[in-house]
Amino acid sequence: MTASEAPPFWWERPDWRAWALWPLSAAYGFAASTRMKIARREKVPAAVLCIGNLTVGGEGKTPLAIALAAEAGRQKIRAGFLTRGYGGTLIAPHLVTLTDTARAVGDEPLLLARHAPTVVARNRAAGARRLIQEGCELIIMDDGFQSARVHMDYALIVVDAARGLGNGHVIPAGPLRAPVTDQMRHADGVVAMGEGPGADIVVRSASRAGGPVSPARLPARDASLLKGARVLAFAGIGNPQKFYDTLRKLGVEVAETRSFPDHYPFGEEDIAELKSEAAAKGLSVVTTEKDMVRLVDGPEALREFARSVLVLPVEAVFEQQSAPTAIIRETMKVWRERMLEGNSQPYGR
């Protein structure tokens, strides 16, 4: 389940619905925590940096992965991305090319592949080995913190500083994938994305454990075409509200919004409704880079619509310029120590 498909009460103060589901959440949380604790994770001969989250998605992991790969490049380290390819159909390890379709590999892998070698694989250990064949020294794993079967040299947790952990309950009573304390035992660092107090509990937990906390944000790369515009904004991402808020902060008049589930496969009926409403109200149409990938991958009606849609690209920017450098260096340091120790270092340092 994604954030945009989650029940609204997950992101509100706990009420009777959350408490009524507590027995199921306790069982789910116990199973998830146990799985993380006893998981046998394959140690591959490359450094592995996992970018994960504590809740269902929408925290900005993809732009963060791109920013860290760029930093690796500045350190002369060849990085590659490893992802399951959510929304795609491929199972076996596949090296993504720019001629692939979102229907096959997913939307996020196509964005990642613009920046570094990207492999889609349900079996992440096999996917890691495929990236190593491509000469990658550093594997940046997009998600998989709770379930991947690959040893992580550095686990970086991303928390939305505005929305935080929702009602603080575990699935199905809330958005947490496992109890916070059990998850944080396996984390090496935290990125608090955006503004607000939502990440405070995670920041305090990381600080008590001596882990670094890095504030970051997702500013627009180029919003010049949107200045002064009245728009209908639509998005099928983990947290559409974050997209709408970003537009408003840029001074864009967001007259109407339409939200879809994460990785939503737009159809011609969806596009016809968006076009009709925008035309009736004299609005420009704007969406995210991730949504645009799926539009241009569709039939001619979607591709034609895409040519009239504005896009708001964003990038991850750390408040402390030294933070990405430190994350990459620490990941490589731990990996080198692991290799010198004969791969004997256990998961969950």
Image: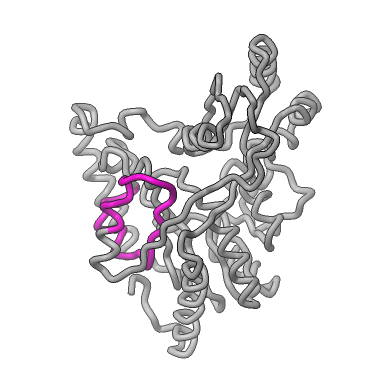
Farthest top residue in view? 280
In the depicted structure, whether residue 296 falls above or below residue 213: above
Q: Residue 115, how many percent across, how many down?
A: 68, 59
**Viewer-proximal residue, 271 or 341?**
271
Q: Residue 133 at what x, y percent from top left?
A: 68, 73
Q: Residue at x 51, y 78 (%)?
A: 332
- Observer-nearest residue: 326 or 152? 326
Identify which residue is drawn at 22% across, 33% down: 14
State the image coordinates of residue 220 (x, y, percent, origin top left).
59, 45
- Is 199 situated above or below 23? below
In magenta, the rendered stretch is 177-203
Q: Is residue 289 visible?
A: no
Q: Is residue 173 left or right of residue 313?
A: left
Question: Quick one: which residue is furthest to the bottom in this view?
Answer: 340
Instruction: Choose top left, top right, bottom left or bottom right for residue 227.
Output: top right
State the residue at coordinates (56%, 25%). Answer: 253
Magenta-span inclusion, residue 187 = yes
- Can residue 278 be seen by looking at this rendering? yes
> Which quadrant, please, contains the N terminus?
top left
The image quadrant of residue 163 is top left
Q: Is residue 104 magenta?
A: no
The image quadrant of residue 23 is top left
- Identify the image quadrant of the C terminus: bottom left
31 sits to left or right of 142: left
Is 15 on the left-hand or right-hand side of 229? left
Query: Measuring 70% from the left and 71% from the top, which residue is drawn there?
Result: 134
How was the colour assigned to the protein in this rendering?
Answer: one colour
